């Protein structure tokens, strides 16, 4: 089944899960698309089975809190940042609920976490104005960048470079920065997310305001600015590409999901998730024709037509 405008418009909420007592601050699909792990401000990690469409397990991180959770390449381990006590990143085995390793270094809240798609390295960005490069096999930081502002960062789909964005700049880093794009900076909001499309050609910059930007990943030109979704409380809303790199989607504070064509910039769909709060998390399944959205509830979506 191919993702088209009509298929996207046909998506409806198939299941809603009310496993959390507070906001879901992050979730991540496993690379095979078969499971989701979510983290919440209620200090819980909930593991969902996407094929059966049900929650499987709940784990807790009461002491340290949990935020920005990411699967590693093994489907039974995750890394996540803490939002209590300290800003250490933790590497957890879901199989026996034990920590494998700690990654201390940041001294303010971690705002970005991205796993390399090709190996065991990952990067983290923090309000302490640094980006750190890590290897799952070592607790020591493998690389450190000092920046002028709070960064958001992400690996590209081939794991060769990562992009870092801060105060009006997007910088691409290999062993050293090899390209820097200057962007007009909107002082009314902060950049809160950066993602590459799967084909590596586009970059999506999300904010805690009412606008998204799609950039050409090679030239740095702003191709589209998307707005028209509600975010009056300046919440960091997660925006995502669909896996085929064709569409861009974001939630809003009124529980609706807005979808645009990434190439033409045309609005394609407005979907009502009937969420009780702002849709802070939104991602398409990397392998299956389904996506998930979350406020304090988790919703699984399915198309209602075969195109």
Image: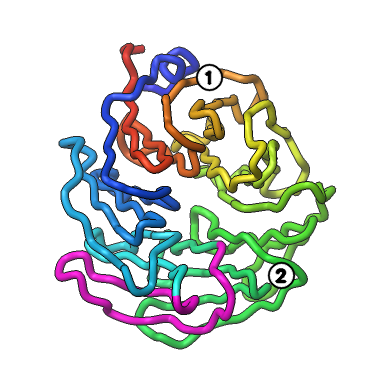
- Give the x, y percent position of residue 240: 52, 40
> Does residue 303 lie above or below 226 as drawn?
above
Instruction: Mark 2 and mark 1 in contact? Answer it, CB < 8 Å.
Output: no
Residue 150 falls in image quadrant? bottom right
- Colour setup of the view: rainbow
In the rendered image, the residue lying farthest to the front is 21
- Give the x, y percent position of residue 270: 53, 19
Magenta segment: does it hold 214? Answer: no
Magenta segment: does it hold 97? Answer: yes
What is the secondary structure assignment of the residue under circle 2? Answer: strand
Drawn side of residue 176 relative to residue 5, left or right: right
Q: Nearer the viewer, mark 2 or mark 1?
A: 1
What is the secondary structure assignment of the residue under circle 1? Answer: strand
Disc 1: which residue: 270
Q: Nearer the viewer, residue 210 or 3?
A: 210
Disc 2: which residue: 177
Q: CA distance from mark 2 to mark 1?
A: 39 Å
Drawn side of residue 164 relative to residue 300, left or right: right
């Amino acid at each position: 089944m191919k993702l088209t405008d009509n298929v996207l418009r046909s998506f409806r909420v198939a299941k809603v899960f009310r496993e959390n007592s507070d906001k879901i601050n992050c979730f991540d699909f496993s690379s095979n698309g078969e499971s989701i792990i979510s983290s919440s401000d209620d200090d819980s990690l909930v593991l969902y089975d996407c094929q059966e469409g049900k929650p499987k397990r709940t784990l807790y991180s009461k002491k340290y809190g949990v935020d920005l959770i990411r699967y590693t390449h093994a489907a039974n381990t995750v890394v996540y940042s803490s939002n209590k006590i300290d800003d250490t990143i933790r590497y957890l085995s879901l199989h026996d609920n034990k920590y494998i390793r700690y990654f201390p270094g940041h001294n303010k809240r971690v705002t970005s976490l991205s796993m390399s798609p090709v190996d065991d390295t990952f990067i983290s960005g923090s309000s302490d104005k640094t980006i750190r490069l890590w290897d799952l096999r070592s607790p020591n930081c493998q690389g450190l960048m000092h920046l002028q502002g709070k960064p958001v960062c992400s690996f590209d789909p081939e794991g060769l470079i990562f992009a870092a964005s801060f105060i009006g700049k997007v910088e691409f880093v290999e062993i050293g920065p090899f390209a820097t794009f200057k962007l007009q900076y909107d002082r009314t909001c902060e950049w809160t997310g950066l993602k590459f499309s799967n084909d590596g050609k586009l970059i999506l910059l999300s904010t805690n305001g009412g606008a998204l930007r799609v950039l050409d990943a090679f030239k740095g030109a702003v191709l589209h600015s998307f707005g028209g979704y509600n975010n009056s409380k300046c919440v960091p809303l997660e925006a995502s590409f669909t896996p085929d790199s064709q569409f861009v989607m974001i939630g809003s504070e009124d529980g609706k999901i807005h979808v645009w064509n990434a190439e033409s910039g045309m609005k394609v769909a407005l979907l009502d998730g009937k969420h009780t709060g702002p849709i802070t998390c939104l991602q398409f399944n990397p392998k299956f024709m389904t996506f998930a959205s979350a406020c304090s509830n988790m919703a699984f979506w399915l198309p209602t037509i075969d195109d």
